Amino acid sequence: MLNNIEFTNRIQKIMEYHKLSASSFADKVGVQRSSISHLLSGRNKPSLDFVLKVTSVFNDVELQWLLNGKGRYPNHAADATTPLSRDLNLPNAKTMKRIVVFYTDGTFEEFKK
């Protein structure tokens, strides 16, 4: 079962990451601004249509993460442009090919496009 408070927190996290107000988020997703307001206030629950719109507009949002918090956000593999180049809408911006994170215990994780 969907936890409305946690779902709302994840929507707010998407808005913060993309630097969107509730109004601009609604416009980008293609829903009425009042729908976002009602969703964020807890008055309404998200519809399947809304969830699918969010995951189709924001490539960095995984369905499982949005619905139940499992997985990562942002999903860097799905959206390989850097946040700065995406925010500035640079036409010749480089895209990431690979990120390697080295840990102090000698292990590492590799993230590829």
Image (spheres, rainbow, N blue to C red):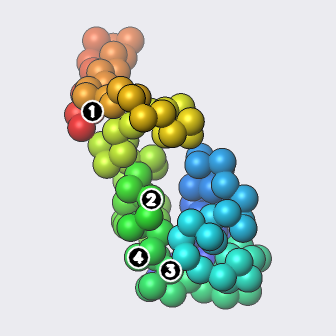
User: Residues at badges 2 and 1 in contact (C-beta under 8 Å)?
Assistant: no
Residue drawn at x 34%, y 39% is: 80
Find the distance from the CA under tag 1 to the CA under tag 4. Answer: 25 Å
Q: Is residue 9 something one can see in this rendering?
A: no
Local secondary structure at mark 4? helix
Q: Which residue appears at 38% of the width and 56% of the height?
A: 59
How packed mark 1 is, by other alpha carbons closer than 10 Å (few <14, some 14-19, many 20 or more), is: few
Disc 3 secondary structure class = helix
- Judging by the rendered image, the residue that carries numbered circle 3 is 50
The residue under label 1 is which amino acid type? Phe
Residue labelled with disc 1: 111
State yes or no: discs 4 and 3 in contact (Cβ < 8 Å): yes
Q: Is residue 108 above or below residue 38?
A: above
Disc 2 and disc 3: Cα gap in Å?
Answer: 12 Å
The image shows residue 35 at horizontal and vertical percentages of 67, 83
First reached walking from the N terminus: tag 1 or tag 3: 3
